[in-house]
Image: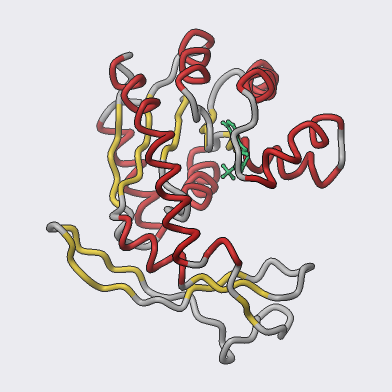
């Protein structure tokens, strides 16, 4: 099974693909995670991509394609791509290089994402990965019922894991989130159109409930499509 997961920042793609990895036994290939790990290691690749990541710019196609090619060559089958393809050139290369069984597209209203991302709180301790969300969303927009419970710490605004105070990431502030969403819509549209025209199957999912339920819905839809 060879899948692509598409969705705006904050739509939980990373969480759903981690769940699909567990439930379906497939590999998760996240180009963003790979680049961040290489930057941390300060490998040759890490040094090459560091500035692009810092500025939120796309890493050049040749570099990303080389990285993805090496991984696909190794694992060959049973994977989910998260964060790739991001340009039409990457999508063209991918469809020429391998067969893709389905694209999973996560739909969510921008207004919900802005509310949810702005409510994200992380642990202020740089060595802790504590992650919380203080928003409780229960509303209907254009006929879609969003029911997204919060993920609160046990003690008010203190990390459950290490007790440090919780903070908001700078790029989770509403103005920055709006900008990130604009860039996402601009970048994704042509890639999505290209994939649709190429005849790849699409599965559409709404980010309107808890991640576990969303992952199960994706699996049901993959079954229906006989993927
Ligand atoms: P992400 O975690 O997917 O948002 O990726 C983090 C950063 O890695 C992006 O802002 C880009 O700088 C880089 N990146 C990840 N995937 C790609 C890709 N497919 N094409 C170009 N740059 C990418």
* Colour mapping used in the image: secondary structure
Residue 173 picture location, percent across and down = 51, 67
- The residue that appears at 61% across and 44% down in the rendered structure is 56
Q: Residue lying farthest bottom?
A: 156
Task: Give the quarter of the figure containing the C terminus.
Answer: top left
Vertical placement of residue 17 versus 10, above or below: above
Identify which residue, 129 or 16, lies in the foreground.
Answer: 129
Q: How many marks?
A: 0
**Quarter of the figure with residue 77:** top right
Tell me residue 171's x, y (percent): 57, 61
Please tell me in which quadrant of the rendered image residue 224 appears. Answer: top left
Residue occupying image coordinates x 38% and y 68%: 115
Question: Quick check: 136 left or right of 28?
Answer: left
87 relative to 218 in the view: left or right: right
193 to 33, vertically: above or below: above
Q: Position of residue 134 (x, y in %)?
A: 46, 78
**On screen, 73 above or below 20?**
above
26 in relation to 211, above or below: above
- Name the spot of residue 117 as percent of width and height, x first: 46, 64
Residue reaching furthest left?
A: 143
Name the residue at 35% across, 45% down: 106
Q: Measuring 60% from the left and 67% from the top, which residue is drawn there? A: 169
Ligand 1: image quarter:
top right
């Amino acid at each position: 099974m060879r899948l692509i997961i598409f969705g705006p920042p904050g739509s939980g793609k990373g969480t759903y693909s981690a769940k699909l990895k567990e439930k379906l036994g497939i590999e998760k290939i996240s180009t963003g995670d790979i680049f961040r790990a290489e930057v941390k290691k300060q490998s040759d690749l890490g040094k090459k991509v560091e500035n692009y990541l810092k500025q939120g710019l796309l890493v050049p196609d040749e570099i990303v394609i080389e990285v993805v090619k090496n991984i696909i060559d190794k694992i060959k089958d049973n994977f989910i791509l998260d964060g790739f393809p991001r340009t039409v050139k990457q999508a063209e290369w991918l469809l020429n290089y391998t067969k893709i069984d389905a694209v999973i597209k996560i739909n969510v209203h921008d207004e919900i994402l802005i509310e949810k991302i702005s409510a994200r709180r992380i642990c202020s301790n740089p060595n802790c990965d504590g992650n919380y969300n203080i928003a409780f969303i229960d509303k209907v927009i254009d006929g879609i019922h969003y029911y997204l419970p919060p993920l609160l710490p046990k003690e008010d605004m203190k990390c459950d894991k290490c007790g440090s105070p919780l903070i908001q990431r700078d790029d989770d502030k509403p103005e920055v989130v709006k900008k990130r969403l604009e860039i996402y819509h601009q970048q994704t549209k042509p890639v999505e159109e290209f994939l649709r025209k190429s005849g790849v199957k699409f599965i559409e999912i709404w980010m309107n409930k808890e991640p576990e339920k969303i992952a199960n819905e994706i699996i049901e839809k993959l079954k229906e499509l006989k993927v």
